[in-house]
């Protein structure tokens, strides 16, 4: 067993880092400070939200898709301090060789160091969400509600990031199936969360065998270039490789045609094998194109397949796809296919998209800027709203425990998310305040509103999970419905229209009061 | 327990996805094909390499840093098929309701489905590496050596990506300590690999408590804005928060000064608390700046600290830092500090860098394009080199099992990595062939070469790990030494000079022969 510098402490197994120690050091130093001041069990409310949509450089998100909650709940319910997880804290020394964490604090963690006591409200997975509106609200003892921050942000930020990217890829794909192929270039075991989030974001399947099993889906995938290479190294060729594949998988025969020369060898060899399959009573599935000009090659491959009578054979596209490239490829097909006598709609209808690295890494914007802020603290039985003043006004969070309402206009389209103090009734005529600009407001009379929907649901209460069990289909349906109810301008892949997140006058006034107060008391 | 669509299969626990099922479906369909053709135990050689350095858009890597091997070896040694991991394969059905994986194949996996049989050579962690030169070479039964692809790429690609980014951040920081703070916005549990890789890449510490424990280091961290907010919500203020912190951590007092107003309140309050600490015989550590113009604020904070006699107090910078921003901040300090009567070198000497999201996500280029290619297959006891012809010549891999030599010039600087068939002797006068351009070559006479170093070491052989146990300090030293021996142009953050990766004439000829042969046989 390996040892650290001192030669005395055995280095623990890697799995130690997956449980309650999956946190930042300052969460623990703060928790000890609260313990020391007898503030550790003071009821506190924290809020998780993100500040801005991902901006991928050449294209930008106009909405996000919430994801990650169910796995996060599993994690938090399993995470707990015990002798093994306390050992590294008990042995931590500061620069002077003194222990960082005292025995009384470690003992308290041993007794109370779990997330059992936390109450959680959250936006369900699959829902469209917007910046500065709470996605998750946590209530519980100050030290414990603080301690959950790192894992909560890590898990919800990442899956929300990836579900958002997946939703955009699905939108760009015009309803064609999107398959997630990113495992080989994903962020180590974060890959599994990325696959799950991709499925919530609208991907119909994944090559990831393990997570597909966990999610109750069949994984997707056929063969790689290496299979063709292996047959070549054996003195056989691509055709022999394709034949072997078709023989073993006659009813799910999808062949990768670009190992040697897509149009000169791959597609003709595939067609030969497809013909052989047909004579044996099997219908081939199709081909996959993994390099080159995918628009041009899919047109040319379709021509060859059609000529041979395989008009329904699928064409799976892969190779560095993202939403913008898919959009461009489909636009190019729209333009070019007619020149070859092909109906672009019919061609696009047989496509599927294999999307990998750029999906599971959210290429262009690889992290979500989600934050977790203290919004209220109990003072003698009353909630005292908390504020953090920032030199950037947009970074001053909205104080206090809140409700979030989604407002739908007369057409049934979502027109704004409205934040209000928790439990405060909404007036009939809505007064939507801009969160920062004092003079920007919008009135919505009752007749302009078709529906007002509360977004946060109870997740954990009285020490138990109360949210409905996670259901992938339901989450995917929620995403599809929410996206459908967005303004087309908000759904645009490039420079989308900005969705409104507003405050009620009550919340606006509370925020202004607190900012004034903090500025006065500053010393 | 949740169920899938059919309502019959119980959905397994998430941890099922972390073991041997952490793979792409096509690895298994191909393995079954090899099994079906009795090719599954045919000895095969595969090679892992990456094609291009990360290009972060405004800046580009001129080298990478290998990382991830030790955790990958732990994973592969633990990964195995058993009843639990075979169950999802046995129950997988194709579109017609037929089983995808046969019982004989599943039984074979149950008996032989581990990576015990693989022989591995690799470049040790911490070493500088370059495109198209093998980082890892795997030899073993075709089906098993194929099956390891996904996990190998996932784990080695990601840690190499992050160690590379960390090395760049360390270079930009001019020797000042770099602290990894990215956990909250990392890719879920990939965060732990990111922390490890950051440490290999030169970060001196991390806020990640779990991985720090696993690596035998003390985690770093003090307090967040929320601690100051909590005291404000209690009717106390920033000063009270700082005092509480100093009382509990008198010898490691580092205060975050930007919750309210950095120069108007944070730094003055910190100085007051530092003075109180000093009267009690403790020396404060310093302050952290987490927003605003970090160059300007660090100059102003230094002036205030110096005036109060805290000339040695550290100033930790954080907030969306990456290598380019750090470079710019330090350049700005070089320019601006003298105008305020400050010695820029003295100021920079007291800085430390807290680097988070942009490090652990490798912002700008969030995945490494590493690939895993079949390079040879046993044919009647002889290695038959394998080739894949690509329409892009740069994508045609170099065939056969290989050795990699690093060539150092007279100054002791590394001048090229040279690929040659495994076991082939190097000639005294080196003839370095460009991997694609037939007429680009470079001769290096013996007197122009100070050292020739073999880069690949034996990692696993005869079913056992033979590489020296991983040692973090050693890996960090290797990185530092390798970077030091690069040409300064290769180390440049922006548009670096291109390092040469060359072929010996023997390898060049082999590649040309195989390409010609494959082109002829194409049908």
Image (spheres, coloured by chain):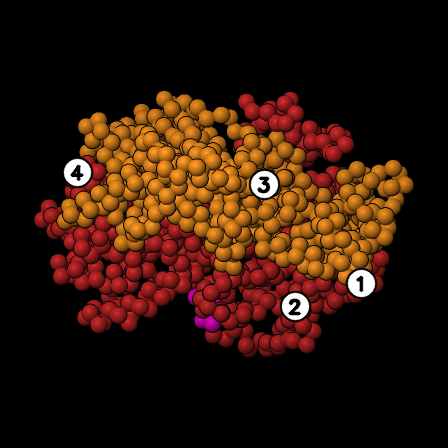
Chain colours: A red, B orange
Q: Earlier in the sequence, mark 1 or mark 4?
A: 4
Please say whether residue A486 is one of the residues in the magenta stretch. yes
Give coordinates of residue A13: x percent, y percent: 54, 29
Q: From the viewer's perspective, is residue A413 above or below residue A71?
A: below
Q: Earlier in the sequence, mark 4 or mark 2?
A: 4
Around disc 4, counting alpha carbons within 10 Å, would you say few (fewer than 14), some (14 to 19), or many (20 or more)? few
What secondary structure is marked by label 4?
A: loop
Please say whether residue B303 is one of the residues in the magenta stretch. no
Q: Which mark is nearer the camera, 4 or 2?
A: 4
| Residues at marks 4 and 3 on the same chain | no
Q: CA distance from mark 3 to mark 1?
A: 41 Å
Contact between labelled residues 4 and 1, with CB atoms less than 8 Å apart: no
Q: CA distance from mark 3 to mark 2?
A: 42 Å
Around disc 3, counting alpha carbons within 10 Å, would you say few (fewer than 14), some (14 to 19), or many (20 or more)? many
Contact between labelled residues 2 and 3, with CB atoms less than 8 Å apart: no
Subunit of label 4: A
Give coordinates of residue A309: x percent, y percent: 13, 59
Q: Is residue A213 left or right of residue B339?
A: left
Residue at 69 percent of width and 42 percent of height: B221
Residue that label 2 marks: A435
Q: Please state, as top left, top right, bottom left or bottom right, where the C terminus of chain A lies in the image.
A: bottom right
Residue B294 seen in render: no
Give coordinates of residue B419: x percent, y percent: 36, 39
Residue that label 1 marks: A519
| Residues at marks 1 and 4 on the same chain | yes
Residue that label 4 marks: A235
Residue that label 3 marks: B202
Q: Which mark is nearer the camera, 1 or 4?
A: 4
């Amino acid at each position: 067993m390996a040892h650290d510098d001192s030669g005395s402490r055995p280095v623990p197994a890697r799995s130690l880092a997956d449980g309650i120690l999956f946190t930042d050091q300052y969460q623990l130093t703060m928790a000890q400070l609260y313990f020391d001041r007898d503030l550790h069990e003071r009821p506190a409310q924290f809020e998780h939200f993100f500040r801005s949509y991902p901006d991928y450089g050449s294209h930008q998100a106009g909405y996000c898709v919430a994801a990650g909650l169910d796995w996060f709940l599993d994690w938090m319910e399993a995470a707990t301090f015990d002798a093994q997880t306390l050992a590294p804290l008990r042995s931590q020394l500061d620069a002077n060789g003194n222990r960082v964490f005292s025995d009384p604090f470690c003992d308290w963690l041993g007794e109370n160091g779990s997330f059992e006591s936390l109450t959680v409200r959250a936006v369900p997975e699959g829902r469209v969400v917007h910046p500065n509106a709470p996605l998750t609200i946590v209530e519980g003892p100050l030290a414990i509600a603080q301690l959950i921050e790192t894992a909560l942000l890590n898990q919800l930020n990442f899956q929300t990031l990836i579900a958002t990217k997946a939703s955009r890829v699905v939108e760009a794909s015009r309803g064609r199936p999107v398959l997630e192929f990113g495992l080989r270039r994903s962020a180590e075991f974060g890959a599994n969360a990325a696959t799950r989030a991709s499925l919530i974001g609208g991907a119909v399947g994944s090559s990831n065998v393990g997570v597909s099993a966990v999610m109750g889906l069949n994984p997707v995938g056929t063969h790689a270039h290496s299979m063709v290479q292996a047959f070549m190294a054996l003195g056989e060729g691509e055709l022999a490789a394709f034949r072997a594949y078709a023989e073993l998988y006659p009813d799910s025969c999808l062949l990768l045609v670009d190992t040697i020369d897509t149009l000169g060898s791959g597609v003709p060899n595939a067609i030969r094998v497809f013909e052989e399959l047909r004579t044996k009573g099997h219908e081939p599935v199709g081909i996959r194109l993994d390099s080159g000009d995918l628009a041009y090659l899919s047109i040319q491959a379709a021509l060859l397949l059609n000529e041979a009578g395989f008009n329904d054979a699928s064409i799976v596209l892969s190779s560095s796809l993202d939403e913008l490239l898919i959009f461009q490829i489909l636009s190019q097909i729209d333009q070019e296919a007619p020149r070859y006598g092909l109906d672009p709609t019919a061609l696009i209808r047989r496509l599927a998209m294999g999307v990998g690295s750029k999906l599971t890494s959210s290429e262009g914007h690889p992290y979500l800027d989600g934050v977790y802020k203290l919004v209220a603290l109990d003072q003698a039985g009353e909630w005292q709203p908390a504020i953090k003043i920032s030199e950037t006004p947009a970074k001053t969070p909205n104080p206090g425990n809140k409700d979030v309402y989604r407002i739908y206009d007369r057409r049934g389209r979502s027109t704004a998310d409205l934040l209000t103090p928790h439990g405060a009734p909404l007036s009939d005529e809505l007064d939507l305040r801009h969160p920062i600009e004092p003079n920007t407001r919008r009135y919505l009379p009752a007749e302009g509103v078709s529906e007002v929907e509360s977004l946060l649901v109870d997740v954990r209460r009285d020490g138990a999970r109360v949210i409905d069990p996670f259901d992938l289909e339901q989450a995917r349906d929620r995403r599809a419905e929410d996206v459908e109810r967005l303004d087309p301008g908000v759904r645009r892949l490039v420079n989308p229209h900005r969705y409104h997140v507003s405050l009620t006058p009550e919340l606006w006034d509370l925020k202004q009061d607190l900012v004034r107060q903090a500025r006065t008391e500053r010393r």
